[in-house]
Image (tube, rainbow, N blue to C red):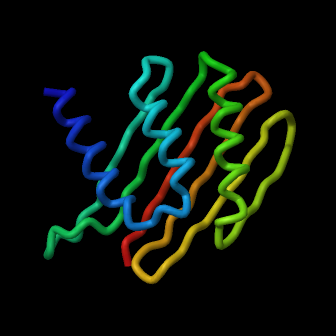
Amino acid sequence: MKRWLLIACLGASLMLTTGARAQKRIDDVVDRLSLIGKATYTSTLVRDPKTRRVRTIVRELSVTSAPQLGHTLKEAFREETKNATRSTQKQEKGTFQQWLTFENKSRESVYRLSVEASGAAEVTIVVKIK
């Protein structure tokens, strides 16, 4: 049952993110890593209670046991920086953090990457449907 729920949530989040493909590289890497055993992945949909339309999608991916995957995520973010509406990054106390914002008339997507010196990485993606 959990597997079907995970597949349904993943499918819904994939369908909803296909309209904003400027960040395709990051989405592809997160989708690929979410299917392997070395990562923890959650996807949450927030719906309008009256219309049942999806208003917000929150996807979170955490990788702790494979430092090379943190590098893969960092590279995907670097490649998409040029396509972002806004980009911010900082290096502080051994932790690299980067935020990318992508906007169009129908949605706003915020991508956050945090990579520790140990190689552990976390990605949070928040998509707000306008």
Residue appearing at x 16%, y 68% in the figure: 52
Q: How many marks?
A: 0
The picture places residue 26, in percent across and down from the top left corner, at 56, 48
The picture places residue 9, in percent across and down from the top left corner, at 26, 44
Q: Quadrant of the N terminus?
A: top left
Q: Quadrant of the C terminus?
A: bottom left
Residue appearing at x 65%, y 66% in the figure: 83
Residue appearing at x 42%, y 34% in the figure: 41
Left or right of 15: which side holds 39? Answer: right
**Looking at this rendering, what residue extends furthest in the bottom direction?**
105
Left or right of 115: which side holds 52? Answer: left
Say which quarter of the image contains residue 119: top right
Q: In the image, is residue 15 above or below residue 118?
A: below
Left or right of 94: which side holds 46? Answer: left
Left or right of 32: which side holds 93? Answer: right
Of 113 and 106, the residue lying toward us: 106
The picture places residue 104, in percent across and down from the top left corner, at 49, 78
Residue appearing at x 82%, y 51% in the figure: 90
The picture places residue 3, in percent across and down from the top left corner, at 21, 27
